Image (spheres, rainbow, N blue to C red):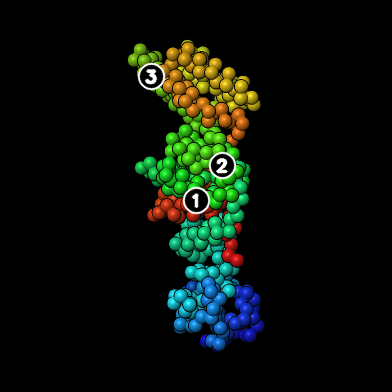
Amino acid sequence: MPSLHVEIKEFYAQSLQILNPWKVTAVSIVNPETTKEPGIVEVRVECCEKVLWVDPDTGERATIHGWRERRWRHLDTCEFQTWVVAMVPRIKLSSGKVVTAKVPWAESMQRFTNAMETRLILVLRLCPAVSKASIVAGITRDEADGVMARAVARGLDRRAPDPLELIGIDEKAIREGHRYATILTDLIGERVIDVVQERTKEAAAGMLEALPEPMTAGIEAVAMDMWPAFIGAVEEKLPKAAIVFDRFHVKKYLNNGVDLVRRQENKQLSAAGDMVLKGTKYQWLRTHEDMRLKSAVEFRQLLVHNLQTGTAWGLKEMFEHFWTYKSRACAMRFFYAWIQSVEDSGLKPMIAAAGTLHRHMAGIMNYITFPITNASAEGMNSIIQSLRTVARGLPNFANFRARILFHLGGLDMNPA
């Protein structure tokens, strides 16, 4: 197939940013009529054989140990797939190791040109559903996973060790069967710092230890739930940081107490033929911000009954005032007064929940100084949730981690 006009070669040379000693020698269309699919534009690039190569580690001259043909997918040309083909020298280093020389239009071990890789990163960021993004980009899912993995590795290498101040450690279920991941977030920058498999103390401590010292030296507070593994990891690796227990996890303990009271009371009432609590579970757990609204009518009718569940619910709602305090002294007085009210109620599930909060009082009180929570970045949590749903079909954890960091790591991921 004869080559196209020389100006076309110059066009691709500029598109690929090809400089001496490389040059575009031919541009051809391969098999345009032998298939129903569009043809393929093949851009042939060559390197002068007399070029002297240098060992990048020592600066000494390296010898050519042979040539290897390589192919890279480039940006489509008028809906034609475009491929760059070149014979690349294999150079022998002073150490005796033989490596393939680097080319200016693609990074090492990359199957796409830098321009194509940059476009794929854009498509994948705009379309988190990898299967759909792959169709739009005209690549396979495996290739898409490879692009994201390389982009994340590139971004992590470039990430500056800027000091962190407020961070969060949280767990996310990634698969059925109690399979979890531990996620470290920058609460100020609203970005994910890292993700590790499991939610053990060793996993969390290893993740913190892997961070550069400049990033961890200034951490003032860490938001987390009351999981002992996270507490132990932070106390060991960040002894100067304040532990702040997430207010939404605190509310979860209180909700559990209310629900246990409801279940016990419903069992007693049902035995006597009173079904007033039947099917009301979520009404007691739901937040009723305005009791005057029509949606709260049924719940208001429940409150007029002299129910133990109503008392438990009132104690749960009473604790919400704690989060409004600005003074630690006032917050502590309220805390102890609330515990006394719970004990006076005689409701064992609520007393047990209050006991848990009392044992973790220091971390709850730290909220007054550092009003932080892992749920502060709602958009970030929503994306993690959607990625978790997709990740259930992934064969390994590495792909799930790459997807989270790809979309939420705030990384500089494009090829140079």
Q: Position of residue 174 (x, y in %)?
A: 43, 45
Earlier along the polypeptide chain: callout 1 or callout 3?
A: 1
Q: Residue at x 52, y 41 (%)?
A: 238
**Three-letter residue code for mark 1:** Ala
For the C terminus, which image quadrant?
Answer: bottom right
Q: Residue at x 43, y 46 (%)?
A: 203
Pointer 3 residue: 264
**Left-right relation of 222 to 261:** right
Within 10 Å of the Cα at label 1, are there few (<14), some (14-19), or many (20+) other Cα atoms? few
State the CA–CA distance, disc 1 to disc 2.
15 Å
Q: Position of residue 76 (x, y in %)?
A: 57, 71
Earlier along the polypeptide chain: callout 1 or callout 2?
A: 2
Q: Residue at x 61, y 22 (%)?
A: 329
Pointer 2 residue: 167
**Visible residue check, residue 251:** no
Looking at this view, is 98 or 384 the one in front? 98
- The image quarter containing residue 18 is bottom right
Q: Compared to 20, does 133 lie above or below?
A: above
Pointer 1 residue: 210
Q: Position of residue 111 (x, y in %)?
A: 49, 69
**Three-letter residue code for mark 3:** Gln
Frontmost of labels 1 and 3 is: 1
Looking at this view, is 73 or 257 the one in front? 257
Looking at this view, is 357 or 316 the one in front? 357
Q: Position of residue 50 (x, y in %)?
A: 55, 87
**Mark 2, secondary structure of its residue:** strand
State the CA–CA distance, disc 3 to disc 2.
39 Å
Can you tell which mark lies on residue 29? none
